[in-house]
Amino acid sequence: MFIGEYSHTIDNKGRLAVPVKFRMRLAEGAVITRGLDDCLFLYPRDEWQKMADKLANLPISQANTRGFVRMMLAGAMDVKLDSQGRVLIPDYLRRFADLKKESIVAGLFNRLEIWDSAAWNKYRTDVEARSQEIAEKMGELGI
């Protein structure tokens, strides 16, 4: 399970060091793709397969579904950890998430999210300001 929030830098070649506690889970390979809210999603290979299966079974007759599936699947790239525990983030994905040097790696149970540090701080501040409202909505869902 991925949990926690970690600050890391992206080097000049576009490599990001994965937090040590997550490396073993990604040792067999991973998939990085466009995420939501202007971040990237990094899935272990087995979790990516589950997500891809769900996406493949969505109805292609709906335009929103086709768009979402295209965004997730066409933007996906296989990645492997190098000997120093880094992944190379392709240029097109760095541009999508507007990643600069300072980044945040956030663990979200079955995936990691990679954020530009400034974007993450703004997002987190906005969500924290609405935490009471969000909690009430979660209560309606039984959480």
Image (cartoon, helix red, strand yellow):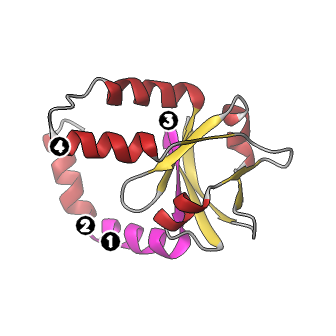
Label 4 sits on residue: 63
Label 3 sits on residue: 110
Please state the extent of the stretch shown in magenta in the rendering. 108-130
| Residue 110 is a magenta residue | yes
From the viewer's perspective, is the residue at label 1 or at label 4 nearer? 4
Which quarter shows the C terminus? top left
Note whether 18 is above or below 11 in the view shown.
above
Marks 3 and 4, Cα distance to the nearest angstrom? 27 Å
Q: Secondary structure at mark 1?
A: helix
Label 2 sits on residue: 130
Q: Please, what is the three-letter code of the amino acid marked with disc 2?
A: Arg
Marks 1 and 3, Cα distance to the nearest angstrom? 24 Å
From the viewer's perspective, is the residue at label 2 or at label 3 nearer? 3
Marks 4 and 2, Cα distance to the nearest angstrom? 31 Å
What residue sits 20% from the left and 28% below the top?
A: 59
Pick whichever of labels 2 and 3 is earlier in the sequence: 3
Pick whichever of labels 1 and 4 is earlier in the sequence: 4
- Where residue 75 sits: x, y (%)? 47, 47
Question: Could you say which quadrant of the image residue 141 lies in?
Answer: top left
Label 1 sits on residue: 126
Q: Please, what is the three-letter code of the amino acid marked with disc 3?
A: Asn
What residue sits 38% from the left and 69% below the top?
A: 123
25 and 38: which is toward the camera: 38
From the viewer's perspective, is the residue at label 4 or at label 2 nearer? 4
Q: Please, what is the three-letter code of the amino acid marked with disc 1?
A: Asp
What residue sits 55% from the left and 71% below the top?
A: 117
Note whether 62 is above or below 92 in the view shown.
above
Pick whichever of labels 1 and 3 is earlier in the sequence: 3
Q: Is residue 97 visible?
A: no
Pick whichever of labels 4 and 2 is earlier in the sequence: 4
- Where residue 14 sits: x, y (%)? 69, 63
Is 35 left or right of 84, judged from the image as shown? left
